[in-house]
């Protein structure tokens, strides 16, 4: 079917002075199971929804023009209902409609990156799937592990629900310049909700996503969930205060860093959205009082969510330094922004790499007389325009001189990212974290410290 | 203007005989089970105007075959409907289900046995109102019924030139109204959705077409502040009307946000507009009342319902209803509306909180089967690629009796929160947050003109323990327009942090005594 789509596009090409296209085809398989508690057995889960998804899809981008002053661009999906001739006409109608849309979606011209070739010799293993088994058997294994580990736990808790998804996608990209490449992408998602028999008004909901189960240690995940649920106790809503020191986990920190990285995308400058400029210092008032914030990107980290074999139309992505000790060293510049802003392109892309600090987790907990350790936010919302964030506290520990003195639930933490980074301290370990893209979020690949202490720029609203 | 409806698209209609056969085959192969198919064809076009023009066209076409047996759901979903490919996949699916059925106890199979309502039963339940008005008295087994939302002017009839022309005109208006001439950027966006679906089981064949339109405008100041307008609903051009006064207010407020103060974190009296009220309704006893969450033991609602504990005062009444086809002063519905859900349950009005007492949960099919509860029209999924869950449709507080100006007069020191900015719930702990973009200060019953942002300069989260909030509703505004249903705003909903579905939410203006703001 992809060849048929391409044939139609090639026929359309001759009507235009400039006409280029890119077709991405996906063959995807996903196995999904949802679980709930088996009645009468508090640690047993049974599968109440068992589904298999098989997808064949085609995304097409068209660039067209009658002059070299501007491009008309449109991105669309091709849908085919069946393989017969009728649907080919339907496909041609869809392409004609897209061409009509592209004619009116004019943008100033930029040279499509066709002269920059993908280097097939650069190792592609980094982003290849290492799931050799079928997704269904991977899911069966996860289900068995989950069941076994929950049963083996000596602690008392209720297994309320779980969700497991295993996904495998074969992606083939081909464009009108002759560049073609196929690769696999895999991902998994596991979510577990545990309740406490004693604390009826609290639960633990934790989840893990990743590219491959090879690096996923089930025992650690179950252990983390069980530790949380068994430590649930009487919580209070904290009192309001204008300034509070907080310790957050890499999952939440990665979303904050993602917002910073968004502001480094130079297309924002062209669009006149808030953006970080070259040489700009991100620390509030230009002053650092904590440890240095360093951010770089790497598209070749093995088994990470933002590792890619190429970007754009077949361009080799690059790794590089974005921010060094709070100062912007490079922004993310593709060929389009490079043309519009008259700056050199750099094709920086990939997973976020943040430098670790010098303190252990325990040392961070004791760094201030009082530290609020956020175990989980209810829903962290980060604004990449204003570089602010806020969320209700789902569960937090109030630590005094490192010791937990109170469990907190409720109240709202809000933060100002520039102030946070100007006085932040990072744990001395290095961990990987992946968030697979979904309808709500883009993918995140993060390598950096597991814990971060913000001493400034956070306020707490409560009682 | 006379309203029109949309016929069932050819892409769906031509599949009816073919898919009927497949469902009937499933029924014959899996006698103890209830089987159905749902096919969806969603078309969306989008146009955006900033420094550049961009457009996109997406179409999502896929089907889900479902088998319900022994209180479990088995599904196969795909988007390649070529007959031989489909037959092969269904064959493997049936074999897989048959082997799994063998592991289900006969008591579960008997206990959770389900049969579809007939057309006669549906007509008896719904009568001649709402979705019932589409059902004739003489419908027979597997007769086809088509439902369609109505519209005045279909934006899908606009070509790209028309769409960009519309956006360019609005940009000219904004530039003209920007007297300070200091806006650094403005974004204008138009989106049209045409969502058609087909449902077939052993008793009913039905299709629906829902036309939705959305307009979005955002302006940015040189200091980096932004303000936006969102206007949309279930209909055509009539949903996206934006007046010059609206645009003038958009621009002036953006400049005022440059000078906004930062809120001191604390507890305040708050008057919420329909947008924010709707988010509170959605988060309060929206998510907490979702049937699957209750079934999993992850919601406190079942125990509260059983003990008849009051969780709100007399003003605390919340409805969930997919059949919203007019609201407030608008003769159109909202994006959370449908005629039937993804499991073929027709839309029905459901009082989930009645003057502070919890009603029954919002059930999907499996929740109704497993709990022997009442079925509701709340079985929804993000797309054919994603699992089914109990999801909200349109959730709203009912009208009150107060005038808006009287509610404002009751504020000693507090704020007005009008523009929603996300929200979150905790069904077990019963706390919620509802975000708002900014606050308008009120002192001694008068607006001071001062705007406030969050303590760190971002948006503000309104937060509280749900029963406390609902016990302290001080007043609700009265009916506006002809509709008994308050205004709903265009919205979306994530189940915890994923599974995005469309959901309208709204309500009257509500005055809250004490809300944590930060």
Image (tube, coloured by chain):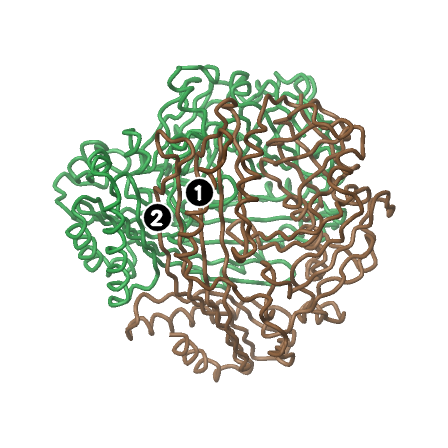
Task: Tell me if B104 is positioned left or right of B392 in this view.
Answer: left
Q: Is residue A234 above or below residue B93?
A: above
Task: Tell me if A430 is positioned left or right of B208 in this view.
Answer: right
Can you identify the residue that label 2 sits on? A50
Q: Chain of mark 1?
A: A
Q: Quadrant of the C terminus of chain B?
A: top right
Can you identify the residue that label 1 sits on? A148
Residue B268 placement (x, y as % from top left): 66, 21
Residue at position x 37%, y 44% from top? B388
Query: Which residue is at the front of the view, B133 or A115?
Result: A115
Q: Is residue A378 above or below residue B234?
A: above
Q: Would you call the spot at circle 2 few (<14 residues within 10 Å), some (14-19), or many (20 or more)? A: some
Residue A177 placement (x, y as % from top left): 55, 81
Query: Which residue is at the front of the view, A8 or A436?
Result: A436
Q: Mark 2 falls on what kind of element?
A: strand
Q: Mark 1 falls on what kind of element?
A: helix
- Chain B's colour is green
- Chain A's colour is brown
Q: Chain of mark 2?
A: A
Of marks 1 and 2, which one's residue comes earlier in the chain? 2
Task: Tell me if B200 is positioned left or right of A215 in this view.
Answer: left
Q: Residue furthest bottom?
A: A14
Q: Is residue B441 above or below residue A75?
A: above
Residue at position x 58%, y 58% from top? A305
């Amino acid at each position: 079917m992809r060849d048929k789509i391409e044939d139609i596009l090639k026929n359309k090409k001759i009507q235009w002075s400039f006409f280029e296209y890119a077709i991405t085809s996906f063959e995807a398989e996903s196995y999904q199971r949802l679980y709930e508690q088996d009645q009468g057995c508090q640690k047993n889960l049974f599968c109440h929804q068992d589904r298999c998804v098989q997808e064949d899809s085609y995304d097409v981008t068209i660039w067209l023009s009658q002059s070299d002053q501007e491009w008309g661009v449109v991105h669309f999906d091709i849908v085919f209902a069946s393989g017969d001739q009728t649907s080919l006409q339907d496909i041609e109608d869809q392409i004609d409609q897209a061409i009509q849309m592209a004619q009116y979606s004019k943008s100033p011209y930029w040279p499509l990156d066709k002269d920059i070739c993908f280097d097939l010799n650069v190792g592609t293993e980094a982003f290849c799937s290492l799931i050799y088994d079928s997704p269904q058997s991977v899911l069966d294994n996860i289900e068995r592990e989950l069941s076994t580990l929950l049963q083996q736990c000596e602690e008392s808790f209720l297994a309320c629900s779980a969700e497991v998804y295993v996904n495998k996608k074969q992606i083939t990209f081909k464009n009108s310049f002759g560049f073609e490449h196929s690769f696999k992408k895999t991902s998994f998602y596991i979510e577990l909700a545990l309740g406490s028999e004693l604390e009826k008004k609290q639960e633990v909901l934790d989840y893990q996503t990743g590219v491959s189960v090879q690096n996923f240690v089930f025992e650690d995940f179950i252990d983390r969930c069980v530790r949380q649920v068994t430590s649930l106790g009487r919580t209070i809503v904290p009192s309001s205060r204008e300034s509070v020191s907080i310790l957050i986990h890499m999952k939440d920190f990665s979303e904050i860093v993602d917002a910073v990285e968004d502001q480094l995308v130079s297309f924002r400058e062209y669009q006149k959205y808030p953006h970080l400029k070259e040489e700009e210092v991100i620390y509030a008032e230009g002053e650092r009082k904590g440890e240095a914030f360093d951010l770089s990107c790497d598209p070749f980290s093995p088994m990470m969510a933002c590792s890619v074999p190429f970007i754009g139309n077949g361009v080799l992505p690059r790794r590089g330094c974005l921010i060094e000790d709070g100062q912007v060293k490079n922004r993310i510049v593709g060929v389009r922004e490079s043309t519009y802003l008259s700056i050199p392109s750099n094709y920086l892309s990939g997973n976020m790499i943040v430098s670790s600090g010098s303190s252990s987790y325990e040392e961070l907990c004791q760094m201030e007389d009082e530290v609020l350790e956020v175990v989980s936010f209810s829903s962290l919302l980060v604004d990449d325009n204003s570089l602010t964030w806020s969320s209700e506290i789902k569960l937090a520990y109030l630590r005094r001189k490192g010791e937990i003195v109170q469990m907190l639930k409720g109240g709202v933490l809000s933060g100002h990212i520039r102030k946070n980074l100007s006085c932040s301290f990072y744990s001395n370990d290095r961990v990987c974290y992946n968030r697979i893209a979904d309808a709500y979020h883009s993918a995140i690949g993060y390598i950096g410290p597991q814990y971060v202490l913000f001493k400034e720029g956070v306020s707490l609203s409560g009682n | 203007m006379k309203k029109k409806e949309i016929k069932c698209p050819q892409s769906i209609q031509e599949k009816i005989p073919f898919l009927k056969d497949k469902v009937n085959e499933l029924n014959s192969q899996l006698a103890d089970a209830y089987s159905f198919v749902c096919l969806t064809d969603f078309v969306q076009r989008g146009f955006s105007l900033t420094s550049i023009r961009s457009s996109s066209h997406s179409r999502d076409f896929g089907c889900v075959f479902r088998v319900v047996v022994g209180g479990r759901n088995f599904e196969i979903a795909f988007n390649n409907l070529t007959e031989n490919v489909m037959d092969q996949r269904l064959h493997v699916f049936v074999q897989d289900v048959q082997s799994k059925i063998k592991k289900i106890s006969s008591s579960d199979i008997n206990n959770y046995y389900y049969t579809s309502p007939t057309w006669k039963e549906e007509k008896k339940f719904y009568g001649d109102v709402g979705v019932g008005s589409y059902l004739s008295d003489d419908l027979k087994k597997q007769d086809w019924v088509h439902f369609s939302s109505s519209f005045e002017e279909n934006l899908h009839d606009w070509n790209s030139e028309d769409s960009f022309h519309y956006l360019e005109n609005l940009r000219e208006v904004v530039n003209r109204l920007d007297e300070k001439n200091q806006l650094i950027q403005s974004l204008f966006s138009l989106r049209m959705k045409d969502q058609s679906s087909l449902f077939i089981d052993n008793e009913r064949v039905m299709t629906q077409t829902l036309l939705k339109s959305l307009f979005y405008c955002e302006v940015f100041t040189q200091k980096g502040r932004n303000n936006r307008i969102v206007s949309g609903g279930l209909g055509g051009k009539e949903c996206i009307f934006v007046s010059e006064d609206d645009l003038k207010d958009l621009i002036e407020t953006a400049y005022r946000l440059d000078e906004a103060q930062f809120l001191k974190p604390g507890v305040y009296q708050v008057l919420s507009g329909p947008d924010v009220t709707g988010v509170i309704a959605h988060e309060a006893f929206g998510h907490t009342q979702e049937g699957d969450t209750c079934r999993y033991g992850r919601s406190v609602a079942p125990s509260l319902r059983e003990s008849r504990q009051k969780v709100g005062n007399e003003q605390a009444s919340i409805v969930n209803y997919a059949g919203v086809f007019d609201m407030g002063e608008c003769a159109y519905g909202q994006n959370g509306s449908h005629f039937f859900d993804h499991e073929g349950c027709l839309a029905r009005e459901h009082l989930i909180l009645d003057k502070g007492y919890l009603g029954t949960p919002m059930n999907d099919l499996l929740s109704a089967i497993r709990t022997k509860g009442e079925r509701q029209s709340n079985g929804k999924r993000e797309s054919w690629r994603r699992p089914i869950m109990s999801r909200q449709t349109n959730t709203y507080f009912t009208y009150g009796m107060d005038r808006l100006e009287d509610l404002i007069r009751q504020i000693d020191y507090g704020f007005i929160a009008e523009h929603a900015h996300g929200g979150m719930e905790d069904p077990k702990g019963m706390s919620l947050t509802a975000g708002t973009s900014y606050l308008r200060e009120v002192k001694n019953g008068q607006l001071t003109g001062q705007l406030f942002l969050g303590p760190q300069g971002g948006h503000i989260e309104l937060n509280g323990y749900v029963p406390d909030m609902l016990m302290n509703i001080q007043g609700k505004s009265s009916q506006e327009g002809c509709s008994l249903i308050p205004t709903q705003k265009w919205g979306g909903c994530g189940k915890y942090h994923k599974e995005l579905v469309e959901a309208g939410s709204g309500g009257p203006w509500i005055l809250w005594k004490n809300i944590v703001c930060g």
